[in-house]
Image (spheres, rainbow, N blue to C red):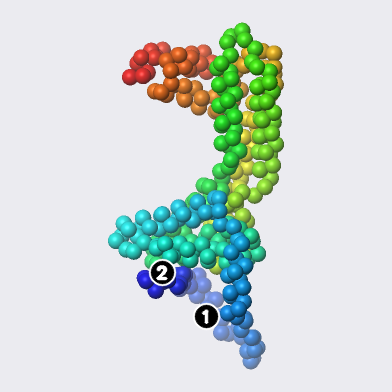
Amino acid sequence: DALWDRFLFRRTVRPCSEASWPALLALEGAHVGPRPDVPPSPLPSPSELLELRQASRSVALDGAASDFVLDAVRYARSRSEADGLPPPSDRRLVRTARALRIAAHADGRGAVGAPELLLLPHLLCARGADADALERWVEEQLEQRGAAAGAVGYILTGLFGRVWDLAIRQGANQRPPMAETRALAAEARALLCAAASEAEAPGELTLSLDPPPLWLAPDTARRAADALSRATCRRRERLGQVAQEAARMACALEASAGDALCPASLLELLPRLATDEVLRMLQDDAGEEQQRQALWLLSDGMGLHVNVDVGELQS
């Protein structure tokens, strides 16, 4: 383990499956006549290896890829510690980062992405069983994280929170501040454009595996490609939802230029976002007046029959 931790990464090689046995039997018979002299593939010289290592230092390993690697290390350490085995060391983490950068650079990329992250089981695990478990974890996480809408989803939630607060501040017969309403509408329009642009661009962790890197086994490459394909579809769906909700928000703000912005209308127009705000108003740290207003919105704005005293709600 100490030797592996210092110098190597481990790739488990298993025997051929029974389905491949007939091909093995026919392998020798396929060669008729003298074997052609095929020169071996030239190995890189020490100077070329040094040049590759130095050039790979410019490869980016940050953002989603960096978070992914650190979570994989935590996962591998938890499994090792649970079994009473030495976990991947700090030295192993440094060498893992170096190997990922070299792999990305050698494959012509300027940032570590999904193809390189699939190397993690062989860089962090000393036992085959641990590598198999981490491989499944990596595939699941690539699909889950690759489907995320990214920053635009958080921006949409924050923007709607400001729109909701503006609506709450308005009295029944008061006009909303024109400058603030127009500024929020402009932000919603900008967010609509950003979400549409994001939907057309590949995500940080949804890089195609066609063709698959040489270090991936065919079944691993197939599973990972399927996971990334599903993640890409889900990501586009979520970004489409963000764009749609941003467009509705902009229309509501633009239409309220001369009228009060109504929370009940926001509940009807943007139910997912508005429901989250109503639930926030019902939290223990909210004021009693906010809780009463939230209960009214639940009963009137959402068409639900709610008869709960605020004191009972707080208890």
Question: What amino acid type should be assigned to the residue bearing mark 2?
Answer: Asp
Of callouts 1 and 2, which one flags the residue occurring earlier in the amino acid sequence?
A: 2
Q: Residue 311 lies in what quarter of the image?
A: top left
User: From where the camera sits, is residue 214 visible?
Assistant: no
Mark closer to the observer (1, 2): 2
For the residue pair 48 and 72, the one nearer the viewer reads as 48
The secondary structure type at the circle numbered 2 is helix
- Identify the image quadrant of the N terminus: bottom left
Can you say whether 20 is above or below 101 in the image? below
Residue at 53% from the left image edge and 65% from the top image edge: 98
On the image, the x and y values in percent for residue 287 come to 43, 18
The numbered disc on residue 5 is 2
For the residue pair 197 and 56, the one nearer the viewer reads as 56
On the image, the x and y values in percent for residue 303 come to 51, 15
- Residue tagged 1: 25
On the image, the x and y values in percent for residue 96 come to 49, 64
Residue at 55% from the left image edge and 26% from the top image edge: 161
User: From where the camera sits, is residue 109 visible?
Assistant: yes
On the image, the x and y values in percent for residue 224 come to 54, 57
The secondary structure type at the circle numbered 1 is helix
Residue at 62% from the left image edge and 76% from the top image edge: 48
Question: What amino acid type should be assigned to the residue bearing mark 1?
Answer: Leu
Q: Is residue 2 left or right of residue 212?
A: left
For the residue pair 268 and 286, the one nearer the viewer reads as 286
Q: Residues within 10 Å of mark 1 (few under 14, many from 20)?
A: few
